[in-house]
Image: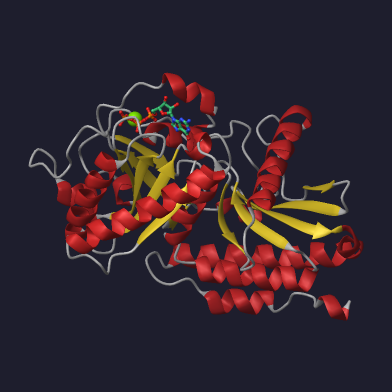
Amino acid sequence: MAFADDDGASTSFVGSFPKGFGYGPEDQDPDPAMSESESKPRILLMGLRRSGKSSIQKVVFHKVSPNETLFLESTNKIVKEDVSNSSFVQFQIWDLPGHLNFFDSAFDSEHIFGGCGALIFVIDAQDDYVDALAKLRQTVSKANKINPKLKFEVFIHKVDGLSDDHKIETQRDIHQRAYDDLADAGLENLHLSFYLTSIYDHSIFEAFSKVVQKLIPQLPTLENLLNIFISNSGIEKAFLFEVVSKIYIATDSSPVDMQSYELCCDMIDVVIDVSCIYGTRDDLTFDDSSYAIIKMNNGTILYLREVTKYLALVCILREDSFERQGLIDYNFLCFREAIQEVFEVRQKMQGSQPNSENATNLVNGLAEKSQS
Ligand SMILES: Nc1nc2c(ncn2[C@@H]2O[C@H](COP(=O)(O)OP(=O)(O)OP(=O)(O)O)[C@@H](O)[C@H]2O)c(=O)[nH]1
Ligand SMILES: [Mg+2]
């Protein structure tokens, strides 16, 4: 995974969210020639017709409201989208129409599957999924032959129409049948990850977050930095968000509960809306010295700080821990410096491992909660 240049780090506008918040125009008519962007990590969206692939892409990356996807037309050619023009995290998403067979000789399947990091296979859980499972089996076995490093992510999608019991039963059934099919094809060692998703709630963002995280080589370093930060600051949960899409690229190692994630997503929306309306600059909604705190009526505090131009840290903590706000603010500055260091090193040494040792040294400057 490549990361965008954060060259504004030394200016006073480091980490400012742009007012025209969003990604660049969608690439509807891609140039078949190999462009620079084609070398970015790639995520493929596959599945039968009408399973919901284009809707997922629109809702997660274009802020389209779920209801508007009702009128989406069926896709008839590969749609490539660069999630990088203005974003910190860079990758490409290819939406592959459900009715085409990409292993056919008419397509360069080596090119499509060869350089790709993850394949998301979308199954419509509200429909009969026998055909979808047959296509999954065919796709997985062929794509794995071309690219053994490819990660397979199965989205059991449109679960908004299912009761809780039905969801669990559907997941169990699809899981079982998919693995039986793989065993029949002699691929019992292959790993598939399953997610229950819907565009009508945050589950699709959560699932996408997990897919993207697997493609970030610095993930263990980021997790480690978050663990050190929260344990020294009395924070309960922290997410590092890619603000444009609201997918989280890392969190501390305590389990994620959906409610906390939703709360943090909502906080980002509130902050962006307020700064768009009341911000003093036309081109920026945030600058690096501003941050947001929301006190809830249940004794919980939400704390948001900008880390880089497109990344924000959102934390949940108890009100009594916030009495030491100075400590949290100081620790955050150390944390931010460490994150910037990780990505600067990454940029300098494209393709090599991040300098996690250096970053850990920086974080060692964090004030101990107990010492203050
Ligand atoms: N209930 C529900 N409907 C969904 C969800 N996601 C997508 N849909 C609907 O599913 C229909 C088909 O969605 P598309 O995104 O066009 O499907 P596609 O997979 O891109 O289809 P092709 O382009 O033909 O391959 C649309 O009417 C969407 O509104 C979901 O999470 N829940
Ligand atoms: Mg489509």
Residue 336 picture quarter: bottom right
Kindly identify the residue that appears in the image at 88 percent across and 53 percent down: 299
In the displayed structure image, the side of residue 337 where residue 81 appears, left or right = left
Q: Position of residue 280 (x, y in %)?
A: 77, 32
Residue 232 picture quarter: bottom right
Work out whether residue 34 or residue 44 is closer to the camera in this orientation and state it: 44
Colouring: secondary structure
Quadrant field for ligand 2: top left
Kindly identify the residue that appears in the image at 74 percent across and 72 percent down: 231
Q: Is residue 81 above or below residue 221?
A: above
In the displayed structure image, the side of residue 114 where residue 10 appears, left or right = right
Q: Please say whether residue 134 is visible from this viewpoint.
A: yes
Question: Can you name the residue that lies furthest to the left here?
Answer: 105
Q: Please say whether residue 14 is visible from this viewpoint.
A: no
Kindly identify the residue that appears in the image at 52 percent across and 36 percent down: 160
Q: Is residue 226 above or below residue 292?
A: below
Q: Position of residue 228 (x, y in %)?
A: 68, 73
Work out whether residue 297 or residue 136 is closer to the camera in this orientation and state it: 136
Q: Position of residue 187 (x, y in %)?
A: 21, 65
For the N terminus, give its image quadrant.
bottom left
Kindly identify the residue that appears in the image at 61 percent across and 48 percent down: 309
